[in-house]
Amino acid sequence: MRKNIVAGNWKMNNDLPLSEALISDLKRQTKTSNAEVMIAPTFTNLWHAFEATRHDDIEVIAQNMHFAENGAYTGEVSADMLKSVGINTVILGHSERRAYFNEDDAILAKKVDQALSKDLRVIFCFGEELADRKAANHEAVVESQIKNALFHLDASAFKNIVLAYEPVWAIGTGETASPEQAQDMHKFIRKTLQDKYGNQVADDMTILYGGSVKPANAKEIFSKPDVDGGLIGGAALKAEDFYAIVNAF
């Protein structure tokens, strides 16, 4: 049975004092839903965040990792490094990594393989640009991103994968896909999995929506049958807003 998840991606925000303050605020909030709660601080604050939430119902996760086990990759972070500071889940394939750091499907497939080989759970992101949506090419783009990065895996691997659909045109723009648009794409994603791996993998897959989810629209978006939660950006930086989204289930 698939899980509801709300994950806050802090991106390149919050130094250590600001992270401490936000975590303290988060710990004062009350969770009234059955959703798993995750936060993804910057690398420099992962250990502190893990220690600060060790006894709380909040999982600290990473925003990215390298595909190599170790080596001469200045500035990069490996799966073993993440695990050594208590991290068990990593976000891969975020649209900003694709756009600004040229991460293509081949690179992401290698990252997914490395993460899974180290028993890390993967939140795998994908989504279309505005031009793809306007050209009615959005389903083909999403299908290609999923197939190229994930469809070399055995069905058993998907128990450690969460999918996150993020329409690129709705990230940081204030624009949001309508709940109906989100549901249509999530349904298509689940059908794509079903066609390759069968009903069990498709039915068990948690699919998150990542595109300007806010307290005002979270309940309607999360009410759709194929939307299992959200990958939250800006709203994750305010504890009250983040937990309003968590409690929208």
Image (spheres, rainbow, N blue to C red):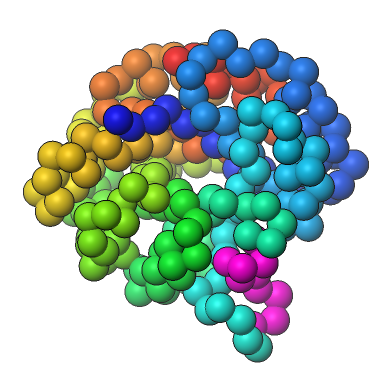
From the viewer's perspective, is residue 134 above or below residue 111? above
Residue 155 within the magenta-colored segment of the rendering: no
Q: Is residue 116 left or right of residue 66?
A: left
Say which quarter of the image contains residue 148.
bottom left
Asked whether residue 39 appears in the rendered view, the answer is yes
The residue drawn where x is 45% and y is 15% is: 249
Query: Closest to the observer: 60 or 95?
Result: 60
Over which residues does the magenta segment extend?
Answer: 73-82
- Give coordinates of residue 100: x percent, y percent: 55, 65
Q: Position of residue 175 (x, y in %)?
A: 46, 32
Question: What residue appears at the point 64 percent right and 32 percent down from the top-left corner?
Answer: 58
Give the residue drawn at x 35%, y 37%.
Answer: 206
Q: How many marks?
A: 0
x, y percentage for residue 55? 73, 32
User: What secondary structure prevails in the magenta region?
Assistant: loop
Q: Is residue 58 above or below residue 150?
A: above
Side of 202 where 1 appears, left or right:
right
